[in-house]
Amino acid sequence: MIGPIINRSFRFGSLNTANLRSTLLQRSFILNNQHRARHTLPELPYSYDALEPAISKKIMELHHSKHHAAYVNGLNAAEEAYANALQAQDVKKQIELQGALKFNGGGHLNHSLFWKNLQPEKSGGGQLKDGRFSQAVSQEFGGLEQLKSSLNAAAMSIQGSGWAWLGLDTKSKRLIITTTGNQDPLTPQVPIIGIDMWEHAFYLQHENRKGDYLTNIWKVINFDEAEKRYQSAIGA
């Protein structure tokens, strides 16, 4: 009696190991999704009018409380829908949701980084202090003004909506300038400074004058935050 029982058990396990593993992974994802904290809109480290006149109160309020909030809500909805599709083993639906996850997830990540990128002028915004980051800027670009010119040129080259980035290549440990379309986050490089080139970031104040927006935003760039990100990225 023992032999047949062992034999049946072995056949069952060998035939269904892949399915069992898939089921366990699905259940794990669903349980984690059910118990995870939902994404929330981060509070700004300053008031909506703190960046004036560089960035108007109206833009900051709409940008944060409406646009960023929409990405947060969209991400939560997409993750919930994905968990349901996973539970139902609806692969087609899982694939369909990838775009919403990427768009809303990227929007949430990019904007969460962007707010910390900014600092009121009276608190030191726009002031690059001596440090490892400023040394890297001088070495890579020749100085702050050259960095501004290069990053602004990259931003102006974006067709449609997107982001201009100063990032760190983790392999070469060098600063690089690049762009991403839509709400795509910067990968695999580490973002040091990001500039939002969606119209909602500037149109109410500057209309189609992107150059004016770029000139003004440098007045409130948080270089202290850039220094922290840079040192963290290089493993200092």
Image (cartoon, rainbow, N blue to C red):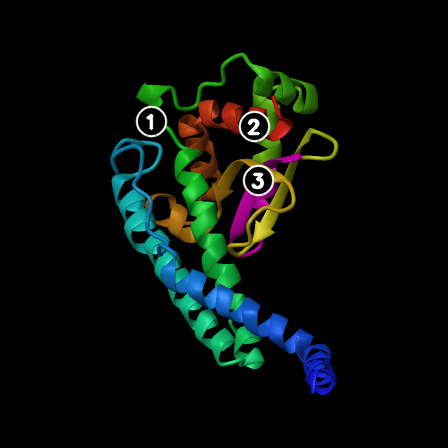
**Crowd rating for badge 3 (residues with CA inside 10 Å; few <14, some 14–19, many 20+):** many
Mark closer to the observer (2, 1): 2
Q: Quadrant of the N terminus?
A: bottom right
- Check the image and name the residue furthest to the front: 1
Residue 74 visible in the picture: no
Vertical arrangement, residue 115 with respect to residue 147, above or below: below
Measure the C-alpha gap from mark 2 to mark 3. Answer: 17 Å
Q: Secondary structure at mark 3?
A: strand
| Amino acid beneath label 1 | Pro
Q: Quadrant of the C terminus?
A: top right
Vertical arrangement, residue 13 with respect to residue 234, above or below: below
Residue 38 lies, in percent from the top left, at 35, 56
Q: Secondary structure at mark 1?
A: loop
Q: Which residue is mark 2?
A: 232
Residue 97 lies, in percent from the top left, at 51, 71
Q: Which span of residues is magenta-colored?
A: 153-169
Measure the C-alpha gap from mark 2 to mark 1. Answer: 23 Å
Identify the mark at residue 165; answer none if there is no mark: 3
| Amino acid beneath label 2 | Ser
**Crowd rating for badge 2 (residues with CA inside 10 Å; few <14, some 14–19, many 20+):** few
Earlier sequence position, callout 2 versus callout 1 = 1
| Amino acid beneath label 3 | Trp
Q: Is residue 147 left or right of residue 60?
A: right
The residue at the point 52 percent across, 60 percent down is 102
Q: Is residue 168 left or right of residue 82?
A: right
Q: Nearer the viewer, residue 164 or 36?
A: 36
